[in-house]
Amino acid sequence: MNHTQKIQLLDAAGKWAAQDPDPQTQEELQLLIQRVTEGDALAFEDISERFSGVLEFGTAGLRAELGAGPMRMNRVVVMRTAAGIARFLSEQANGQYTPKVVIGFDARFNSDVFAQDSAGVFAAAGFEVLLMPSALPTPVLAWAVREFSAEAGVMVTASHNPPRDNGYKVYVGGRITDASGRGAQIVSPIDAQIASLIDHEQPVAQIPRALSGWQVLPAIGTEGDIEAAYLASIHPIIDAPNEQDAARKNLRIVVSAMHGVGGHTMRQALLNAGFPDVHMVAEQEHPDPLFPTVKFPNPEEPGAIDLSLELARKVGADLVIANDPDADRCAAAILDGDAWRMLRGDEVGWLLGDQVSKTMPEGKKLANSIVSSRMLAAIAKDAGREHEETLTGFKWISRVEDLGYGYEEALGYCVAPELVRDKDGISAGIVLADLAAQLKADGSTISVRLDELAAKHGVHVTDQLSLRFTDLAQIPVLMDKIRKNAPASLGGSDVSEVTDLSEGTEKLPATNAMVLHTFAGARVIVRPSGTEPKLKCYLETIEPVDDLADVPEARKRATAQVLAIKDELAAYLNAN
């Protein structure tokens, strides 16, 4: 960068700091500018990255590290984004109605501030605005979009990202979309339409923002309690407690909120459903934006549920349920023989799919994302149900017409799409607990049920290779490598088919992913993560079996094959 460009960069940073309504990020940027003028190379690199472009608004909304500058999450970016959404909603209404927006937020740093700023922008635009009374789970917001027939919903959350991050997720509903999309996350072309209406140069002082004029929804413990209303709506998805009292009272459950906002809601959902024996992981029960007991606040990450397993052993629990920080995901662990193990996301997906398929109305479909296991398709066929495969992400799964149940392997489950058109870790948790209680009452276990599903549909073993990058340019390089020179064999079997999904298929729109099949029935899907700086590889092998007795040996063979493929793929991607 030459001297002129450096002056222009510092000028842009100075103008940003001058208009920043947040004293903390304003001071942060002013200190960086001062360090750059003193010749600090690291500060120059930092400020250059912050002003290297703008956060792109897409189907995942916004998600980035907190801080000053257009490439960070901050009040300036949020208000400009809210103003763009307001323009979109006004254009859609075209003076024919008053748009309604409901806003939720988690307990991360600045989530409440971003929610308040958004409420002010939408109120100033003349909209009817409903604001959550406190930090609550994402599923409560997704439910509220449908419940209140809102045209849009905003959830300020970065889900299970590191503590330094925050995000801005957008839902549509009301008169903006059709029935299958009401309460679902935005997809194309709405994301592009909103993005085109965000003015990244608009001075914050010129964005109309009211200081009042929105309705705060009833708080927990008050009349009309919004959390209680959500819980009452999901309550009927399993049989009334009095019909299963003995079985549910006999199930001991450990619950972790992972330092997020789902602790009270998950515990209350279980109590309402007739599960009185609930033990909370005290160290992770209450919201803490620093997530002090975990490296990453994601139940999938190694070590994240160690405290849950420790408590489960101590109290003699039957089941562990762990939500991610915004409680839209649900992880589970079970006692398998003498040892506790965490269930894979696919395993929970099979269990819930099999359970829900038995009671959902005729004509309803089962659905999962392309990177999830192929077993749900077999379960659907056996149950006489239609099955549909979608692109990765609940914005696609939730839009399946006549959806009765949907899941993705990343711990996302939709067990009541007529209520929450998104993944919901709370309702999934009570369905899983109900299944565990029924099995225990029958002298069985979740582990045995998984074996029974394997005996009926074949042993499916899944695994994942996830590569995290600091240099994001490496991800397209590796995707290009696979496109031009895919492995010829995997796990001792020749690759039979290579499909580039960037060109789309008859059933799927284009997406940046590669699919490899082997003659032995293994499948590998490689794609960049949509929310994290990762390249993800999804592996699955299938071993047919004749009966229940064959399952253990078949599982050993399938596991050996998937581990061999994982090692080969890691070497191919230079990940060793």
Image (cartoon, rainbow, N blue to C red):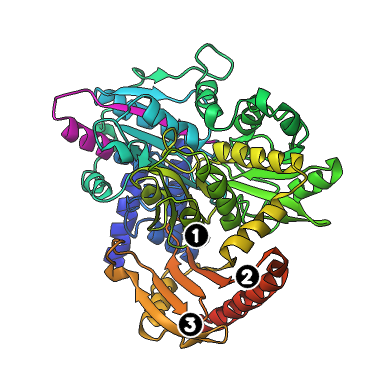
Mark earlier in primary sequence (2, 3): 3
Foreground of the two, 270 or 358 = 358
Q: Marks 2 and 3, how far apart in space?
A: 18 Å
Specify the quadrant that holds the N terminus: bottom left
Of callouts 1 and 3, the N-terminal one: 1
| Magenta-span inclusion, residue 93 | yes
For the residues marked 1 and 2, what is the alpha-carbon distance in whole angstroms? Answer: 14 Å
For the residue pair 408 and 356, the one nearer the viewer reads as: 356
Q: Which residue is mark 1?
A: 378
**Residue displayed at 77% across by 49% down:** 309
**181 horizontally vs 32: left or right:** left
Residue 545: which disc? Answer: 2
> Which residue is located at x 42 percent, y 46 percent?
73
Q: CA distance from mark 1 to mark 3?
A: 19 Å
Q: Which residues are magenta?
A: 84-106
Kind of residue at badge 2: Val
Circle 3 residue:
519
Judging from the image, what secondary structure is the residue with disc 3 in? loop
Q: Amino acid at mark 3?
A: Phe
Q: Is residue 534 above or below residue 251?
A: below
